[in-house]
Amino acid sequence: MTGAGQAISTPTATHTTVEPLLSALKVRKSYGGVEVLKGISLAVNPGQVMCLLGPSGSGKSTFLRCINHLERIDGGRISVGGELVGYAQRGDRIFEMNSREVARQRRGIGMVFQRFNLFPHMTALENITAAPIGVRRISRQRAKDRGLELLDRVGLASLAQSYPAQLSGGQQQRVAIARALAMDPQLLLFDEPTSALDPELVGDVLDVMRTLAADGMTMVVVTHEIGFARGAADVVVFMDGGVVVESGPPAEVLENPQSPRTRAFLDSVM
Amino acid sequence: MPQATLTGPGPAPAGPALEIDPDDIVAVPLRHPWRWILAVFLLIGFVSLGISLWQNENIDHPTITEFIFNPRILSGVVLTVVLTVVAMLVSTVLGVLLAVMRLSNNPVMNTLAWLYVWAFRGTPLLIQIVFWGYLGLLYSQISMGIPFTDFTIFSIDTNTLIPALTAGLLALTLNQAAYSAEIVRSGMLSVDEGQYEAAYSVGMSPVFTLFKVVLPQAMRVIIPPMGNETISMLKNTSLLSVIAVLELYTVATQISSQNLRQVELLLVVSCWYLFLTSVLSIPQYYLERYYGRGKARSLPPTPFQRLRAVLRHTPINTHRTDSQDAP
C-alpha cells in the first residue's frame, strides 16, 4: 500500500491527488451542551484504510456514526463519494433528506458494530440476504448464492443455517462483516469490531479485515488494535477530546509521535 | 479404586476413611411428609365438594346434559368464537398501528395515538358496548359528504349500518386495540437499539426495519400477554348480552328465562368457556415457539413430539440418558 494522500492514482489522473471517497470538514457534534466533536477534518481516498485511535470518550465512535448519519452532525460537512451525507445541496441551499433518501445513501456505506448487532431471529445466511432481497430487490436465488459466497469468504460457509445465538462472538462478527459486504458498499466502517471478543477470537476477525484491506476496500476502523493499525492502515488518526491530535502514515504516528498526548496514549496501550 | 486413592501418595483426605465408591451417592432421599398430608386433605375436600354438587337437589343434571350440545347453545359457542377471533385479529392490527404511531417522531400521530389509548382504556368496556349499541340515539343518520356544506355522498340510517352484532364487534375491537397498542409498544421497546442501527446501516427504511427486524423480535415479548388478552376477550364477549348479541351467554340466559334453570345453564356456559380457553392456549404455545427461534440454542420439543418420544422410546430413552450421564 502507498502512503497517505498518494494512494493508487488512476492512469487517467493528470495529477497525483485523487478525489477523496470520504471527506469530513470541520465536523461538530454536541450531546446536551457537551461538544464531543470539535471540528474534525479528515479525508480518505478510495482503497485506503484509515484507523482511528484514541482514548474512550475522544469522539472517534461518534465521528464514525456521523459518517452514515446514525448521528446527525451540528456543523461542518461530511461527504461520501462526492455526495453530502444526510443533506442534499440544490444551488446554494442545503435541504435535510427524508428517511428514504438517507436509507438509499446508507446502502453504499457498510457498518460493523462492536456488539455485532446481528438479527437474532434470522439465520446467518438470512442476516446477509435480508437487505439485498428487501432493499436492493435482487432475486432470492442470486442473493442466496452471493450470501454463501460471502460466508465462504469469511470462512463460515458451513454455518449458513445457524442462528446468531449458536455462533461464537468471532463468528458472529464475521457474519456481520459479510452482511455489510452484501450491499456492495463503497466504504466500510468498523466501530471497535474486536472489543467485545475473547482474545483468541480477535485474530480471525482481524484476518478477514486484512484481506478486505488488501483487496482494496476503503475502510475506516475505530480500534484499539495497534498491531492491526500498524500492519493494515494507510493513515492513522489519533483523536482526543473531540479533535484530531495527529494523523499520518502508521510509521510516523505510531513509531514517532509528535504530540505528547499521542505518546502517552501509545505508551499505555502498547 | 477407592483403596488406591486412600492409600496412594499425595495428601491424604482429612476425614475418616470410608470404604465408599465416590462415584455413587448412597443417601436416604429427603422425605416430604407435609406434601402428602396437604394432598390428602385437598383430595378429601374436592371429593366432598364433588359429591355435594352431584347430590344437590337444586341442580337438575339431566338439564345440563340436555343443553350442553343444544343447537342454540352451539350456535352461541360459534358466534362467541367468531367474535373473539375477529375482534382479536382486527384489534391487533389496529394496536400495531397505534403503537407505531405512539413511537413515531411525528407529533400529530403521537398525540392521536395517545388520545385514542386514553379514551378507550379510560372508560369501562360495558359502557362502550352500550354506547355503540345505542349509537342511533346519538346520530340517527350517518352520512358522508363535505363538511360545512350540504353536499352528501351517501346517508344511511345508523341502526341499519350498525346492527347489534356490528356494534358489539366494534366495541370489543376498539377497546381491545387500546390495550394491544400498549402491549405491542412494550414489545417494540424491548428490542435493542443496536437492531435499528444495524438495519439502518444496511440501507433499510424505517418501515422495512419495523416489519422485518423489530416486530418479529417484539413478537416474542408480545405473545404471552396477547394470549392473556385473547382469553379475556373470549370471556368479555359475554358482555354483549346487554345489547342482545346472540353469543353463548345471551343464548343461555334466553333459555334459562324460559325453563327457569339458571344454575344449570350457567354450568353449561362455564363448561364451554373453560373448554374454549383451554383450546386457545394451544396456538399460543406454537406461536411462542415460532417466534422464540434463534433465541435459544435449540427449540424445546412440542407436546406432540414429547408424547411421541415417550410412547415410542421410553425404554431406549432412559437407556440413552444413562449412557450420556456416564463419563
Image (cartoon, coloured by chain):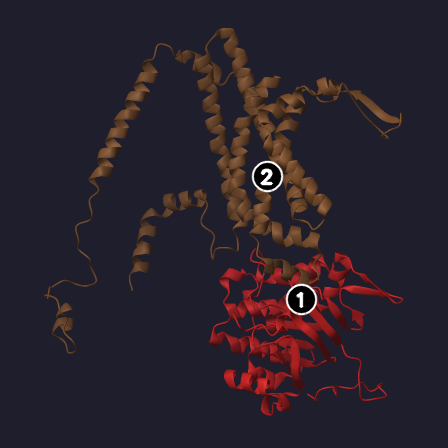
Chain colours: A red, B brown
**Disc marking residue B180:** 2
- Check disc 1 and report its element: helix, strand or loop: strand
Residue B8, position as x, y percentages in the image: 14, 76
Residue farthest to the bottom? A256
Co-location on one chain, circles 1 and 2? no
Task: Compare residues B158 and A26 and report the one nearer the observer.
Answer: A26
In the shown orientation, is residue B47 left or right of residue A75?
Answer: left
Quarter of image, res A103: bottom right
- Check disc 2 and report its element: helix, strand or loop: helix
Graded by Cα atoms within 10 Å as few (under 14), some (14 to 19) or many (20 or more), the crowding at tag 2 reads: many
What's the residue type where badge 2 is placed? Ser
Q: Can you say whether B307 is above or below A2 in the image? A: above
Residue A97, position as x, y percentages in the image: 78, 60
Number of labels in the image equals 2
Q: Can you say whether A174 is above or below A10 in the image? A: above
Residue A111, position as x, y percentages in the image: 65, 68
Inspect this view and state whether residue B86 appears.
no
Residue B16, position as x, y percentages in the image: 10, 65
What's the residue type where badge 1 is placed? Ser
Q: Can you say whether A60 is above or below A234 in the image? A: above
Task: Compare residues A108 and A258 and report the one nearer the observer.
Answer: A258
Inspect this view and state whether residue A225 appears.
yes
Say which residue appears at 22% left-offset and 38% top-offset. B34
Quarter of image, res A79: bottom right
Say which residue appears at 29% left-offset and 23% top-offset. B47
In the shown orientation, is residue B278 left or right of residue A232?
Answer: left
Say which residue appears at 76% left-offset and 67% top-offset. A85
In the shown orientation, is residue B232 left or right of residue B151?
Answer: left
Chain letter, disc 1 residue: A
Read off the residue under disc 1: A30
Chain letter, disc 2 residue: B
